[in-house]
């Protein structure tokens, strides 16, 4: 009996979501392969693939279950701490440009 799962890869401008049927006993990686996401997004490397189910990170070798939403995670473009530092610098520069009574 086959399982139906959804494979989702989030992109900055949207998402690539595909519903696929895989054999019972298939892994999360098997489902990702069957979805064609790896073919459509060459930036993803199978060996370094990070996946999860319903927002929980799971090993790619975990068994897929009927109804799973298998999410393919991409690397962060910027470390979160560095992103906060950059936003803080921007805010400080913006505040410095305001008239003294408006700061």
Image (spheres, grey):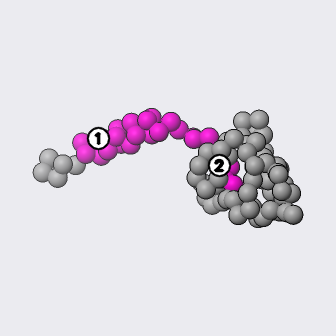
Residue ID for mark 1: 92
Disc on the earlier residue, 2 or 1: 2
Residue 92 picture quarter? top left
Regarding mark 2 in the picture, which secondary structure is present there? strand
Looking at the image, residue 73 sits to the left or right of residue 82; the answer is: right
Looking at the image, residue 72 sits to the left or right of residue 30; the answer is: left
- Which residue: 22% across, 49% down? 98
Looking at the image, residue 81 sits to the left or right of residue 73; the answer is: left
Residue 22 picture quarter? bottom right
The spot of residue 67 in percent (x, y) is 70, 64
What label does residue 52 carry, if any?
2
Residue 70 picture quarter? bottom right
The spot of residue 15 in percent (x, y) is 66, 60
Regarding mark 1 in the picture, which secondary structure is present there? helix
Can the viewer see residue 36?
no
Which residues, given as a range, are shown in magenta?
Answer: 70-96
- Which residue: 82% across, 52% down? 25
Instruction: Work out whether 8 lies above or below 51.
Output: below
- Which residue: 79% across, 53% down? 31
Instruction: Work out whether 56 lies above or below 81.
Output: below
The spot of residue 34 in percent (x, y) is 84, 54
What distance separates the C-alpha of mark 2 from that of mark 1?
Answer: 37 Å
Q: Is 84 inside the magenta-drawn segment? A: yes
């Amino acid at each position: 009996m086959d399982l139906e799962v959804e494979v989702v890869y989030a992109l900055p401008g949207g998402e690539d979501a595909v519903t696929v049927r895989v054999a019972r006993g298939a892994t999360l990686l098997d489902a990702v392969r069957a979805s064609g996401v790896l073919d459509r997004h060459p930036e993803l490397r199978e060996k370094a693939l990070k996946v999860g189910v319903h927002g929980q990170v799971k090993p790619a070798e975990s068994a897929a279950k009927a109804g799973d939403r298998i999410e393919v995670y991409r690397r962060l473009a910027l470390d979160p701490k560095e992103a906060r530092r950059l936003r803080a610098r921007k805010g400080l520069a913006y505040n410095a440009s305001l008239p003294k009574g408006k700061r």
